[in-house]
Image: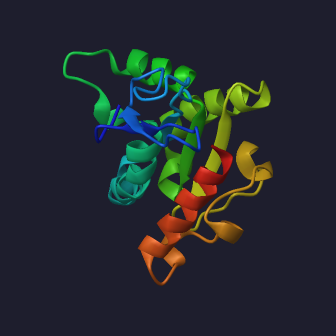
C-alpha cells in the first residue's frame, strides 16, 4: 500500500483524537475506530504522471482517514505481480479506473482489472469509480452506466488547472467513504 503514516481520527465528537492507521480502538476514549477504506487504482502506465498526481491529492484521505491506496508500483521485487494485483483488487472497497485511450487499449487494464472490478461492483462487494483522465470513446463500455469523475465526466486533461480537476475527483471519492 502507498502510505504516508496514515492516522484515523476518532469519530467521538468529544474526543477527535488522532490514532495510528492500524489502531482498532481510540487510544484516548477506547471507542472503536472505523475500518480503513482500501482503494485500488487501475491505470495504463502511459498515464502514470496523472496517477501520481492523484495519489498526491489522495494523501489527506490517507493521513486523516487511514485510507489505504494500492497501485501496481507497490509490488515488491520478486513478488508474483498477477497474484499481488488480484489480491489487492479483491481486497479493495473502492476501485478507481483511470480512463484514457491507453487504458481502453490495454488488454490487462480493460479485460482483466476492469472486468474483475465490474463483477465486484455488480455483486455489491466494491464500488467502482471511473475517473476520466483524457478524452476517449466511452460508448458501450461496461462502466459507462456508472457516475464518473471529475464532475460532468469532463476529462482531467481538459481542465484549465489539473489540480482543480483532481481536487474535484478527491471530493467525489470522499463523498462515498
Is residue 71 visible in this depiction of the protein?
Answer: no
Q: Closest to the observer: 13 or 124?
A: 13
- Determine the residue located farthest toward the left in the rendered image: 77
Q: Position of residue 45 (x, y in %)?
A: 36, 47
**Number of residue marks:** 0
Please identify the quadrant where the N terminus is shown. top left
In the picture shown, does residue 148 fall above or below 32? below
- Residue at image point 70% right, 70% down: 152
Q: Closest to the observer: 112 or 55?
A: 55
In the picture shown, does residue 22 fall above or below 14? above
Q: Position of residue 37 (x, y in %)?
A: 54, 33
Q: Position of residue 59 (x, y in %)?
A: 38, 51
Q: Position of residue 169 (x, y in %)?
A: 56, 61
Please state if 166 lies on the left or on the right of 148 as rendered: left
Q: Closest to the observer: 90 or 19?
A: 19
Please identify the quadrant where the C terminus is shown. top right
In the picture shown, does residue 71 fall above or below 52? above
- Determine the residue located farthest toward the bottom in the rendered image: 160
Q: Closest to the observer: 162 or 47?
A: 162
- Residue at image point 54% right, 26% down: 35
Please state if 168 lies on the left or on the right of 1 as rendered: right
- Residue at image point 38% right, 38% down: 7
Is residue 106 visible in this depiction of the protein?
Answer: yes
Q: Residue 148, located in which quarter of the rendered image?
A: bottom right
Q: Residue 79, located in which quarter of the rendered image?
A: top left
Amino acid at each position: 500500500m502507498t502510505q504516508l503514516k496514515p492516522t484515523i481520527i476518532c469519530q467521538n465528537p468529544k474526543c477527535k483524537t488522532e490514532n495510528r492507521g492500524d489502531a482498532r480502538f481510540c487510544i484516548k476514549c477506547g471507542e472503536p475506530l472505523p475500518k480503513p477504506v482500501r482503494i485500488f487504482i487501475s491505470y495504463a502506465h502511459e498515464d502514470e504522471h496523472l496517477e501520481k498526481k492523484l495519489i498526491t491529492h489522495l494523501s489527506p484521505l490517507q493521513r486523516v482517514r487511514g485510507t489505504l491506496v494500492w497501485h501496481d508500483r507497490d509490488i515488491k521485487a520478486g513478488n508474483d505481480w498477477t497474484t499481488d494485483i488480484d489480491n489487492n483488487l479483491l481486497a479493495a472497497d473502492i476501485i478507481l479506473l483511470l480512463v484514457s485511450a491507453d487504458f481502453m487499449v490495454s488488454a490487462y487494464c480493460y479485460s482483466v482489472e476492469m472486468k474483475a472490478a465490474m463483477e465486484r461492483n455488480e455483486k455489491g462487494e466494491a464500488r467502482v469509480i471511473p475517473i476520466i483522465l483524457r478524452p476517449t470513446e466511452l460508448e458501450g463500455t461496461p462502466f459507462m452506466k456508472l457516475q464518473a469523475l471529475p464532475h460532468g465526466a469532463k476529462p482531467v486533461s481538459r481542465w484549465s488547472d489539473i489540480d482543480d480537476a483532481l481536487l474535484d475527483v478527491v471530493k467525489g471519492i470522499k463523498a462515498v467513504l
